[in-house]
Image (tube, grey):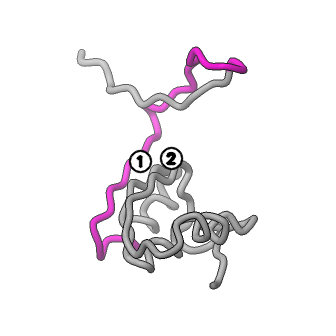
Amino acid sequence: MISYAQNFEDVMLARVFAGRDSGFYVDVGAADPVNLSVTKWFYDLGWSGLNIEPNKQLFDRLAADRAARHQSGLRCWRHCVESPVPRAGRRRALVVRRPRQA
C-alpha cells in the first residue's frame, strides 16, 4: 500500500477497515486531493465522501480531481466559525452557519 497521508493515517485506517471496498468518509480540511491526503487511498478503492476545504485553490483542485465519482464538497470559507461546544475538555468545534438573510 502506498501512503498518501503525512503520518500514515491512511495505512492505519486501512487496517481498521480491511476488507471493505466501499464506504463513506468525511474529510475536514481535505486540502490537496493527492499530497498528504488521508482519503485518496479510500477514494481509489471506491469509497465516496464529503470533502470540506476552506482554501479556494485547494477546493477547486479537489473538486476537479474527485469529480468522477459521487463526491460531495463543501467550501467552507466565510460562514465557518469557531464556536464553543460543551464537551469534556472544553474543546472548540467548527460550526457551519448559514448566512443571515438581509
- The residue located at (64%, 75%) in the rendering is 4
Quarter of the image for residue 67 reads bottom left
- Asked if labels 1 and 2 touch by Cβ distance under 8 angstroms, the answer is yes
Q: Is residue 78 magenta?
A: yes
Q: Is residue 68 magenta?
A: yes
Q: Is residue 11 left or right of residue 80?
A: right
Q: Quadrant of the N terminus?
A: bottom right
Local packing at callout 1 (Cα closer than 10 Å; few below 14, some 14-19, many 20+) is some
Looking at the picture, how far across and down is residue 16, in whole percent? 58, 64
Look at mark 2 in the image and give the residue it sits on.
54
Q: Quadrant of the C terminus?
A: top left
Look at mark 1 in the image and give the residue it sits on.
75
Magenta residues (range)? 64-90
Residue nearest the viewer, comparing 70 with 77: 70
Question: Is label 2 in a helix, a strand or a loop?
Answer: loop
Q: Amino acid at mark 1?
A: Arg
- Is residue 71 shown above or below 73? below
Looking at the picture, how far across and down is residue 70, in whole percent? 27, 66
Q: Is residue 47 left or right of residue 12?
A: left
Say if residue 64 shows up in the picture.
no
Residue nearest the viewer, comparing 78 with 19: 19
